[in-house]
Amino acid sequence: GTGMSDTCLFCKIIKGDIPSGKLYEDDDIFAFRDIAPQAPLHFLIVPKKHISGPSGVTPGDEQLIGKMIRMAGEIAGKAGIGHYRLVFNNGEGVGQSVFHIHMHVLGGRSMGWPPG
């Protein structure tokens, strides 16, 4: 089973209960456009398995997280974007608002460092 949560926003999006700008889906992951984009290309990749955040990743999840990173490049590449930023937030203090691990993929504009 995927261990989905009935109350989690991203689990509902994955199940199709809430519409989203879906970009990609397979048995393991789901990618969709960010509802409040911060760059010309801004989408999220989430595992279908409910993991609370980066600190909830277990050794058994390592292949899944690697797939998320690989697919970021594939999806961005199909959009013609070769330079992109990947962001994982862990905890409210750094901006995590949904407690289902998600990777932001942002591209299509120049970005400074460090982030704000």
Image: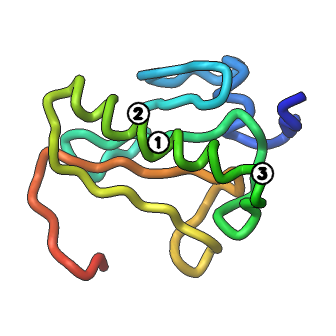
Residue at image x 32%, y 43%?
42
Q: Quote the CA–CA distance across marks 3 and 2.
A: 27 Å
Residue at image x 21%, y 27%?
79
> Which residue is outermost to the left?
110
Q: How crowded is mark 1: few (under 14 residues within 10 Å), some or many (20 or more)?
A: many
- In which image quadrant can residue 9 be found? top right
Mark 3 or 2: in front is 3
Q: In which quarter of the image is the N terminus?
A: top right
Residue at image x 52%, y 70%?
95
Q: Quote the CA–CA distance across marks 1 and 2.
A: 6 Å
Mark 3 or 1: in front is 3
Contact between marks 1 and 2 (CB within 8 A): the answer is yes
Residue 65's x, y, as percent? 58, 49
Residue at image x 59%, y 19%?
26
- Numbered circle sitting on residue 44: 1
Q: Is 88 rendered above or below residue 25? A: below
Q: Quote the CA–CA distance across marks 3 and 1.
A: 22 Å
Q: What element carries label 1?
A: strand
Label 2 sits on residue: 33
Q: Is residue 83 left or right of residue 19?
A: left
Looking at marks 3 and 2 on the same chain, the residue that comes earlier in the sequence is marked by 2
Residue 93's x, y, as percent? 58, 81
Label 3 sits on residue: 60
